[in-house]
Image (spheres, rainbow, N blue to C red):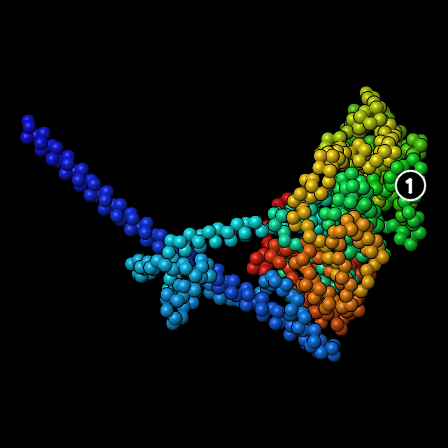
Amino acid sequence: MMWTRTRLALRSIARSQSLNGRRTRMKEQLSAKQHERNEKKKKKLAALANLMELNDRDRLHEAELAKKREAEEAALEEKASGSGSSAAAPAAEGADDGFVVVSNKRKTRNRLTIRSNPESQAEKCGKEATSLKGPDSFDEPAFKRSRNDEAGGDRLPVDGLCPLTQDQYKSLSAELRRRKRQLEDAPGLRLREMGQRASLETPQHARTPIFLTDIQHLLMSALIGQKSPCRPDRWCSVEKWLSLSHSVVVILEGLSLYHYLSNESHFEATNRIFNTKLEMLLPPQDEGKIIDEIAQIPLTNVQAKKLIDEHGSLETAVELNKDPTLFVKTIFPIESNMLEPKGIDLHPDDKFPRTKLLLSALQMVDEGYPIPLQGELHNRFRHFKFTKKSYAPVTNRSPMYGVDCEMCRTVAGVNELTRISIVDEQYRTVYETLVMPDNRITDYLTQYSGITEDIMKKVTKQLQEVQNEVSELLPPDAILVGQSLNSDLNAMRMMHPYVIDTSVCFNISGIRRRKSKLKHLAQTFLKETIQENEDGHDSIEDSRATLKLVKMKLANSIEFGDEILTQHKRLQELANASSGDTINNNLFAHVATRDKRTAIVTVGDLQPRLKDVILKAEEAVPMDHCKAVRVHEVSTPKEAVRKVNEIALENALTIANLRVPEHDFVLESAERNAAKLDRLIERLWNSVAHNGLFLVLMGGSTECSKGVAKIAIKRLNGSEQISAPIGS
């Protein structure tokens, strides 16, 4: 028995020793494999570090080559013009300004080929380490190469590259993490559905242009950030606003969409730089230049502060300062040769201009109004008629008419017009009629329309007759007022340029897209009860209610009845009361750190209208503050390029306004001048720092009013930031 126990104990001890031995051997094997993996990591990281250094060297080398090319081209141009080559040196000197200028062209090289030379390995390792870690980084001996690496295996081709010590490994890891964060924080622009429709890649028959207002919204958001009251969300999405380093805008007045498309192959560098190319709707040629409209946005935070102090909030200031009819004049047949009254000339019942309540062309598109804009909208409304053959310019004394329609459902599956009512500003009914739809009625919608089968039995009037009578009734500058008036105009199958929509200018929800019913608005503001008739709505009652609401708003203020504008004004007043200084409120807290100033570079003298805008900006700045907007008037486009290269990195926004003579694009010289413009754009692109926003706006001509907007955000390697479009 004792012997059995002893034998079992010995077996247990032997088994335990055997297990411990196996565990030790396994640990040793794991340790060796772990060590081998670590060595592989370090070698891969060393190879990656070498690649990073090679890329950095290439960028510096290419930047130097780009400077030399520019200097040589400038010298050749000077010689060609007979002026000598004296201007070549300043062009080369002023283009850098302490920053690395990156070119979009890259060398073709196998990046995984690690270069080695006959110099000693220790010297090479020391040089690599010094560039990343410091001169005292290689105190420890290098690790030996593993057998697996010597045999080939799965490894990077790092022959001739020194492995890393543990400290160097940690330093390189930290550097790579930093670069990764830098790439992840890069801003990017993605087109939404409306932006994709405007793309030059979209066929012309389906293309719908964006508005110059859309570009204004993009620039305003780039300057102010997420707090901007005007955002470009309608057509694009910009990620990482705060990572934008600065913005450079190049305006080419006189260069149209036709000029660009006719000579597109000669814009080689431009086509390489830009992936985002959009057709743009421009204001009428006689209404001012693009730069005049761009300058209407607050160009600096001090200018925005002035607007807030004057109007209570930046949102209200934007509403009051905009001209909603600017692009309507491009789309509708509005007479431009008629003399418009100077000054505000308010209607005696109004406290602010009634034209400020008009929907802009952009709002009309967003709200679904029938509008003769090219592309899909043109196809949708091609059978609609204008309310007048031609229109007079709208003024602050133009008459307002309340309009409301009732509809019934027909066999066509849509609601068609069956009743229309129009009342004037004195609430008198000036037009009232029933209409027989073109298609048979299947549902009278009596609970809403008030229309019954008995009422429609004797009706013979057709839609075309109504359209003719409405056209004869309305004056050429009439302002139509209604609740969701887009539905009424769609039912009338008519288009009108001047509309005020109570569902837009009144808002009691605090959310712009959430609209209140007319019944609720009348109860809240007019203290009237409407739409209580059991037999359905009364279109005359609804027309009068909308007119009363608009006249009440005009008798108060632009933010009256608009909870969004009212909230912003309240918040502004609270911020002023608590801080005593609007510069400290939430709008400017993050802007002040990045809002340097704005510069305008123009060839020739500034236009009077733009001078007035800049003068107002100057008035907003304290006497001891630097100028809000710096203006540089130069004599030639070449000087303008040099000036932009010199000052672009000093400003949050730099605008270069260049005039392209129309005779430059006659048949004989078009190709040569297109290539010349292409080189000019490339030089301006080289002045943009990484994460900089670069816009080229082609401003149309007398022959073709259509323009082009090209947009790019520069990456660290000098190319454009490319992002996938947002799905619809």
Question: Please, is residue 296 above or below residue 163 in the view?
Answer: above
Identified by mark 1, the residue type is Leu
Question: Which of these two is toward me, 92 or 357?
Answer: 92
- Closer to us: 262 or 414: 262
The image shows residue 278 at horizontal and vertical percentages of: 69, 54
Indicate whether 459 appears above or below 714.
Answer: above
* Quadrant of the frame with the C terminus: top right
Q: How many marks?
A: 1
Report the side of 547 relative to 11 (left or right).
right
In this rendering, the answer to whether 418 lies above or below 341 is: above
Quarter placement of the N terminus: top left
Q: Is residue 648 visible?
A: yes
Q: Quadrant of residue 39?
A: bottom left
x, y percent for residue 449: 81, 28
Badge 1: residue crowd in 10 Å (few <14, some 14–19, many ≥20): some
Query: What residue appears at the point 92 percent right and 39 percent down from the top-left corner?
Result: 347
Dot 1 falls on a residue whose secondary structure is loop
Kindly give the residue lying farthest to the front in the view shown.
624
Which of the 4 image quarters holds residue 564? top right
Q: Position of residue 308 (x, y in %)?
A: 77, 42
The quarter of the picture where residue 145 lies is: bottom left
Query: In this rendering, would 429 be left or right of 36?
Result: right
Residue 529 on image: x %, y %: 83, 22
The residue depicted at 67 percent of the width and 46 percent of the height is 591
Residue 709 appears in the rendering: no
Q: Which residue is mark 1?
A: 346
Seen from this angle, which residue lies furthest top? 534
Residue at left 68%, top 75%? 75
Residue displayed at 73% across by 31% down: 509
